[in-house]
C-alpha cells in the first residue's frame, strides 16, 4: 500500500495545550497537504506545503516537512475544543501527471477537552 | 476556494440495486476528478481517477465493473455502485482539480454516505 502512516492514531489533550501530529510517507512527492475531517463529514483543506519548502504557518497551524526523512508534522497551538476532529496528511506523488491526486495517511483523531 | 458539490449527501438502498453519485465542479472546469472511499474510523482510499472524455483509471483492487465512473463533461463526474451489497456501505467522496499541474489543489465534495440494507 502506498498509504502513509500517522502518529499518534489518537491524541487527547486539554484546551490551551499544543497538539502535534506526525506523518510519514513512502514515495517522492510534489507536495504534502493536511486536512481536517469532523465526524462523518467532508474534508477541510488546512495547508499545503511544497516539496522545496521546510516550514509553513497558517494562523495557529505550523507544518514542517523533511523530505530526507519523508515525514511531516502538524502543530496546532493553543488548542480549542472546536479543534476536535480527525486530521489527515495527504501526499501528491511526484511524477504524477494528474494534478490533485492524493494519497492519504491513516489519520490522527484529536480530542480537545474543555 | 473552488466549490465541488456532491449529491446525494446520503442514500439508503436495497441490496442488489444500483446507486449513482454525482460530483460537480460549480465554478471551474475540472479536467480530472478523483473518487475516494472511506470506511468508518479509517482513512480515505483512492478508488479511481476520472478524466473528462476518457476511461477512468482504477486503483488496484477496485472492480471497474462494479464501480462505474463517467466523466462526460468538464463539470460532472458520476460514480455508479452497481448491484450494491452491504459491504459497499461506506462514505464516498470526490475531489476535482483544474489541471494536471503539480501543486494543483484538489477541492473536495461533502461526501455521500451510502448504506446498503
Image (spheres, coloured by chain):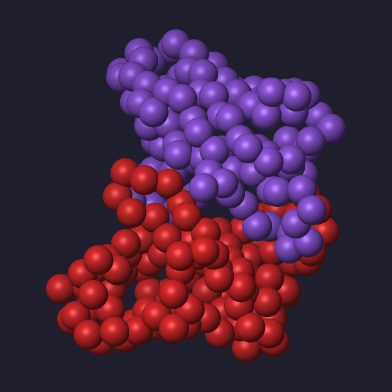
Chain colours: A purple, B red
User: Relative to the observer, which residue lies in front, B105 or A2?
Assistant: A2
Residue B73 horizontal side relative to residue B89, left or right: right
Residue extending farthest to the left is B117
At which x and y percent is residue A86? 41, 37
Residue in the picture at 68% in, 41% down:
A27
Please report the residue visible at 22 percent of the width from the left and 85 percent of the height from the top.
B16
Residue B47 image position (x, y, % from top left): 50, 65
Whether A55 is drawn above or below B62: the answer is: above
A59 left or right of B88 in image: right
Q: Position of residue A18 (x, y in %)?
A: 49, 13
Which image quarter is the C terminus of chain B in?
bottom left
The one of A11 and A27 positioned closer to us in this rendering: A27
Residue A2 higher or lower than A98, as above or below: above
Q: How many marks?
A: 0
Instruction: Work out whether residue A21 can be spotted.
Output: yes
Q: Quadrant of residue B15?
A: bottom left
Amino acid at each position: 500500500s502506498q498509504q502513509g502512516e500517522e502518529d499518534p492514531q489518537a491524541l487527547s489533550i486539554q484546551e490551551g495545550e499544543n497538539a502535534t501530529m506526525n506523518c510519514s510517507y513512502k514515495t517522492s512527492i510534489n507536495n504534502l497537504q493536511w486536512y481536517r475531517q469532523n465526524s462523518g463529514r467532508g474534508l477541510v483543506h488546512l495547508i499545503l506545503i511544497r516539496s522545496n519548502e521546510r516550514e509553513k504557518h497558517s494562523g495557529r497551524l505550523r507544518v514542517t516537512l523533511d523530505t530526507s526523512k519523508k515525514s511531516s508534522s502538524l502543530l496546532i497551538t493553543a488548542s480549542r475544543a472546536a479543534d476536535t476532529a480527525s486530521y489527515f496528511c495527504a501526499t501528491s506523488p511526484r511524477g504524477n501527471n494528474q494534478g490533485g491526486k492524493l494519497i492519504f495517511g491513516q489519520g490522527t483523531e484529536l480530542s480537545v477537552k474543555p | 476556494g473552488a466549490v465541488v458539490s456532491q449529491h446525494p449527501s446520503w442514500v439508503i438502498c436495497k441490496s442488489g440495486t444500483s446507486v449513482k453519485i454525482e460530483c460537480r465542479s460549480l465554478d471551474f472546469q475540472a479536467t480530472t476528478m478523483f473518487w475516494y472511499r472511506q470506511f468508518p474510523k479509517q482513512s480515505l482510499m483512492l478508488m479511481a481517477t476520472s478524466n473528462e472524455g476518457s476511461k477512468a483509471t482504477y486503483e488496484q483492487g477496485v472492480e471497474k465493473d462494479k464501480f462505474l465512473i463517467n466523466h462526460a463533461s468538464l463539470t460532472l463526474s458520476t460514480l455508479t455502485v452497481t448491484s450494491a451489497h452491504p459491504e459497499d456501505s461506506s462514505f464516498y467522496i470526490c475531489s476535482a482539480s483544474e489541471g494536471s499541474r503539480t501543486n494543483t489543489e484538489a477541492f473536495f465534495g461533502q461526501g455521500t454516505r451510502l448504506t446498503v440494507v
